[in-house]
Amino acid sequence: MAKMLQPTSLDNPLTIGTPKVLLPQPCLLVIFGASGDLSWRKLLPAVYNLNVDGVLPSNFAVVGFGLGSEGDPDEWMHQRARDGIGHFSRQQLDDSNWDDFARALFFVPGSFNDSRAYAQLKARLDAIDAQFGVPGSRVYYLAIPPQLVPVCTEHLKEAGLVHGPNESQSFSRVIVEKPIGRDLESARQINLALAKAFHENQIYRIDHYLGKETVQNLMVMRFANSIFEPLWNEKHIDHVQITVAEEEGLTHRDLKTGEVTGSRIGYYEGVGALRDMVQNHLLQVLCLMAMEPPYSLEPNVVRDAKMAVLRCLHPFTPADVDKFVVRAQYIGGESHGEEVPSYRHEVREYFAAQKKPIPPDSTTETFVAMRLFIDNWRWAGVPFYLRTGKRMPKRGSEVAIQFKTVPQILFNAHPDVPLEPTVLSLRVQPEEGLSLRIASKLPGPKVRIYPVKLEFNYAAGFGGKTPEAYERLLLDVMAGDPTLFMRRDAVEAAWEFVMPILNTWSQSRARYLPEYRAGTWGPLEADRLIEADGRQWRIL
Amino acid sequence: MTNAQAPATQPTAVPLNEIESELARQLKIVHGGGEAPVQTAHMSNLIVFCNKFDLGERIAEQIPAVAALHPSRVLLLMGEQDPGENDVSASVQVRTQPAEGRHLVCWEQVTVKARGSAVDRLPFTVRELLIGDLPTNLWWAAAVPPPLAGQFLYDLTEHVQQIIYDSQGWTEPARGVAATASWLVKFERGPMEGQFRVASDLSWRRLRYWRRIIAQALDPGTAPGAAQSISEILIEHGPHAVTQAWQLVSWLASRLNWQVQAGNVEPNVEISWRAAAPKGGLRIRIQRLAESPPEIRRVRIAHAASGKPEAFSIWVHDGRRLAMCPEEGQHSMRTMTIQPQSVPEMVGRQLSDREPDPIFRETMAVAQIFAQGLLS
């Protein structure tokens, strides 16, 4: 006899016809590493904002899990969350909203490696389920270092905290932060460990860049406007530049006292810009920019289209790496008129403060620039220049598409005064928006051509406030929409692409990297990389 | 953001044929001063119609809050039927508001006042003031249901993609609901083939949180069988919110396949219906609270999901949230935060929601049946 299926939220006659993204399902959000920086700065403020916006389900609660609490765990969690929200929330901390948020905020102390802690976690989650009418559904957010992922997922599975993917009444989903591993092998191991506990459609590998409006707008701009897509190929595009520039270094200081107030050195040292930014953010943005039109917006159709781009990336040989990839490290310089130290100084300072042995001079790159090609019909021969760095003059991320120049006749006939090419620039941050540089005639009897920038700014043009990327992505997980998350094969394909670079660098045993002054746009080597092709980096 | 808005220029009276040149002059003044880049932002043409001057003055005060969410060229039309007068006057003003980053956004407002038979000229005045290539929206701020405005509305909506109206406060709700339901079908079809138009009722928008929390409370994943076994619904509302309550009932009826059987009205006290659901009959009551804000205040739903009588209530909690709690057992209150529901904020948000809402249309079709049950 066929088994009678229980009705699920998907069968709710009162929500049929509502877009999936507007239907986050009742669940408990369990944050592993709730005492950590990510939870404090991003996750808890994001959930608070979602609650203030009234988009969370009413059957919902947040449970932190991990070490680090002091005194009463729930009370400690409340203080930690309130502090993070006070500092980083998009919307102001307000007593009424806070009280409502805190009612459903808990903490379970325990070591990730202790099976008894998972039993306690399970008991507490069951009790909170009953309290808030949650049908046993869970979103586990692993805000922890990648090496801890396997042990956590194994314990979750053993403790009976993971439902099967076909469970009709409730769901278990897991969110994993980038970087997934530190190389291809470790990424595979993490993916394998995840796969032992969760089905692939329960795994959400998060890259918060993909939750940003401009990044999502890339697809809309390409496929909802008839003028761009016909030009989106090697016939019309000269080259593409993707830049993610950060003005911050790895250490935060009080501007008045100079005292260190926070540091990411512990995570960053030995990781570097290639793993931290290129392998995930930049390649994901590249995929959206370069992919073929997907035939639908179904998550796997979009992800297949992105995957096809990664498969077409022209692999680097060791000789290519030397020639077309530049890494560098910042030395002392200036930021906002203040002197800032070198990366190596920050590393020494960090390890001394941690009372750990100070490592030999660091060769971790804080800047990477590269030229790559996509070997397919659409993009054959079009160089893509990628660039990312810390301690640059200002924070800014953009995708810039430079179109080929018009023939050298008519207005472009004078070889000494070539026309500025048409450039479409999509700004991801700050001030999300887009601009198009075109040539125009200056008023007057003489024909004088002048570049004009047509500009659209999201905040100014659309009014209102844009939610943070984490807010959008958390809602997507609760709604079960994985479109903006990375699939296993894509993560591994991205690692496959960067591995020759990492291998070449590791074999070179360089003791010094090219340097750039803090507060500049990178090393001379990066300029030479692009100038060798007769092009220039854009000034953001 | 709203508070930081500032008129960049003073309202200046102008003849109708000099509106554009005066706007250009004022915009030039705005662009000329200060260090921040000034951007003129227009997401839409926004026509606002008020059928009383005093109402128009009150609406004028709300327009900056609308524009903060949806910068537009605002054409505020005030028309008052005054048999003794017959004139039209106009004034223009440029306003600015800060945006993220260094930008300063500016937008313009044109106010046109007409009296007597000159009111009928307003739709024609509007046409020359619209900016091309932008969506055009009409905020029908009159208290008259739009379908009862006849030819005037037809003329005013000729180039409009969305009309926003508010059924809250209609003096004859049954008549208004019945007329609007019929009109919606024709209006949304548009005067030309392929032309889409949307009609949006702010009262329906106010219900979004109520609908969401009721959907969650009756979700088959958390309360299997509850939606199908509802035996009684009680909705309590403040004065002027009867159409909201009506729409909420109609929405439930349309989604859960209820057939209305008989209705009864006790004016200003209670409206009740008997309905047949697929698994039995149910009683629906809409009760008016004598003193209360003009909104739904409480919904109580009785059902028999587990084979025995159960019930839950949803109510407005501390003015900023909806709270839900089952009446049986030990449960924590479950809450949902409500975004501010002021009229300008709702209009500002509704302007960007241009997609037809089939659920609203189906709800209004059922609301019409409920209304006919009472009118007959």
Image (tube, rainbow, N blue to C red):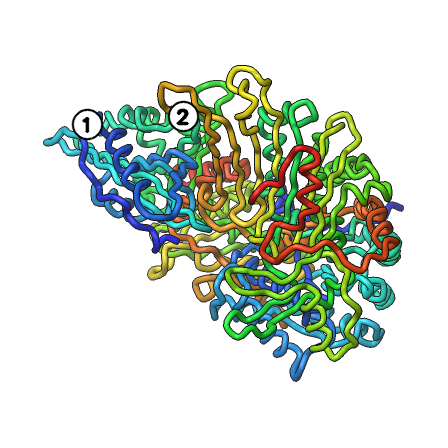
Q: Amino acid at mark 1?
A: Ala
Q: Amino acid at mark 2?
A: Leu
Q: Residue at x 63, y 30 (%)?
A: A223
Q: Which label number is shown at residue B118?
A: 1
Residue B325 occupies quadrant: bottom right
Q: Is residue A96 left or right of residue A81?
A: left
SS for callout 1: helix
Rendered residue at 75%/38% (across/down): A372
C-alpha span from label 2 to label 1: 45 Å
Residue A143 position (above or below residue B67) = below
- The residue carrying mark 2 is A442
Q: Is residue B288 left or right of residue A527?
A: left
Residue A299 visible (yes or no): yes
The one nearer the camera, B107 or B329, is B107
Residue shown at 50% from the left, 43% from the top: A458
Label ID, residue A280: none
Q: Is residue A1 above or below residue A424?
A: below
Q: How many marks?
A: 2
Residue B98 percent across, percent down from the top left? 39, 50
